[in-house]
Image (spheres, helix red, strand yellow):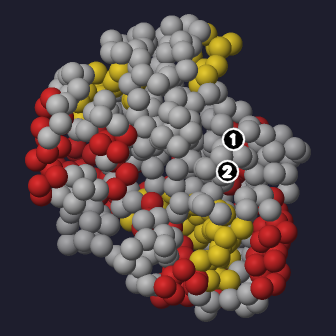
Amino acid sequence: MTTPPPRQAASHALWERARRVMPGGVYGHQNGAALGEDHPRFLARAERGRVWDVDGNEYVDWMCAYGPMILGYGHPAVESAVAEQVAAGDCLPLPGPRMVELAERLVALTLRADLVVFGKNGADATSWAVDVARAHTGRPRIVRARGAYHAARPWALPHLPGVPAHYRDDLLEFAWNDLDELRALFVEHPGEIAVVMTTPFDHQTGAAPAPGFFAGLRALCDEHGALFAMDDVRAGFRFHLGGSCEHWGAAPDLICYSKAIANGHPLSAALAREALRGAAERVYFTGSFFFASGAFAARAGHPRGARAHQRHRADPADRRAAGDGPRRAGPAPRGPDAPARSARDAGDPLPGGPGAPAHPPLVLARHPGRGLRASGPQLVRLGGPHRGGRGPHPGGLRASVPDGGGGGLTPSPCRLPRGEWPTRRIVEGVRLSGLKG
């Protein structure tokens, strides 16, 4: 064991214990050791927009636990709803009414969907979408944007150790925004592609969809009998309460949500249009914890949830079951700025639209004219040495931005006020949230 850096002794000691009983010490993407010797390895507690490691160091969490903490840690309305439900019953031998209530709410909010299933993480949702697409089309192949991440599953990561070779054969890729390359894949593999899965913007580069990209993708899928799936696990509900598809003007057959649904409680959802109901009923999808009511109650406790549900609810008679799926109750915004106006109408006034940068800057409440762009996960330490950042931000904020491939959670000093909740939606990977000043 090497000598731990100052103020990290307990974290490194816990890491050494973990290495003896778990592969790699900590497996998966929350491995703090992979982010450098100075990075904390274990966190002890969190409150609102801040976290504390096991050594007592305090941080502002710009990464919001990789995206789920859209309302901040320990939000009273959410936690009260969860506590009430858990006291009544959480993991039971049959589902509870909260599941049906949330299903009704999501179908009402997601104007391009008619049915929903629930899982526990994003991989559950995207994998269900792939299974339904294959069941519906009878085809094996999946197409994604090159380098995109959709799940820690063999179908999505076929080049990892232990994955049979046929998974690599079934996964095809095209460059983001390149409809010609996508068209060539359909020509090269006629009658073999079940689904094209994309994210609402390119998570690798931050590039927004080019004008006409989603419309062209939709047309190619229709022409060749494939389905279009939107992986909205990271960005869902941040650009628009009806999902990123409403913001960017996409019309998929399947939509996957997770991170922002339950403010840190384990929950994901996958939605489909009516034409896929038969395939969805044939796919076997279950888990002992999928139906636990506590996480469903977390969404019910979202302080905007009930109001938004009433605002977006449409009479079932007004929803189309076939073809393009349900239609909006009342007139929809039209014109090139329609997605942005829809977002404003839903209470989510984020910048951007088709062809615009997907990553708006951080804006501090005290200094609305001053912005900061950041990429990669962020923890900002209070009162510690600044390491690897790009200098002070006007208005008293200094945020660290990792080097190109680092992706680390580099600590840096910050003079933000205490005791406030995050005020902006966060696109996981882009850190858009500020604290009220």
Using a 10 Å C-alpha cutoff, classify the residue at mark 1 as few (fewer than 14 neighbours), some (14 to 19) or many (20 or more).
many
Classify residue 241 as left or right of residue 162.
Answer: right
Q: Is residue 26 above or below residue 239?
A: below
**SS class, disc 1:** loop
Q: Which is more toward the observer, 144 or 423?
A: 144
Q: Is residue 407 above or below residue 364?
A: below
Q: Amino acid at mark 2?
A: Phe
Question: Residue 206 lies in what quarter of the image?
Answer: top right
Classify residue 289 as left or right of residue 138.
Answer: left
Q: Is residue 357 above or below residue 121?
A: above
Q: Is residue 16 above or below residue 40?
A: below
Q: Residue extending furthest front?
A: 2
Q: Is residue 73 visible?
A: yes
Question: Residue 379 lies in what quarter of the image?
Answer: top left
**SS class, disc 2:** loop
The residue shown at (25%, 38%) is 41
Labelled disc at residue 358: 1
Q: Earlier in the sequence, mark 1 or mark 2?
A: 2
Residue 409 lies, in percent from the top left, at: 40, 34
Residue 368 lies, in percent from the top left, at: 64, 14
Find disc 2 in the rendering and name its residue.
201
The residue shown at (85%, 69%) is 180
Question: Residue 28 lies in what quarter of the image?
Answer: bottom left
Classify residue 9 as left or right of residue 412.
Answer: left
Residue 294 lies, in percent from the top left, at: 27, 53
* Callout 1 touching callout 2 (CB < 8 Å): yes
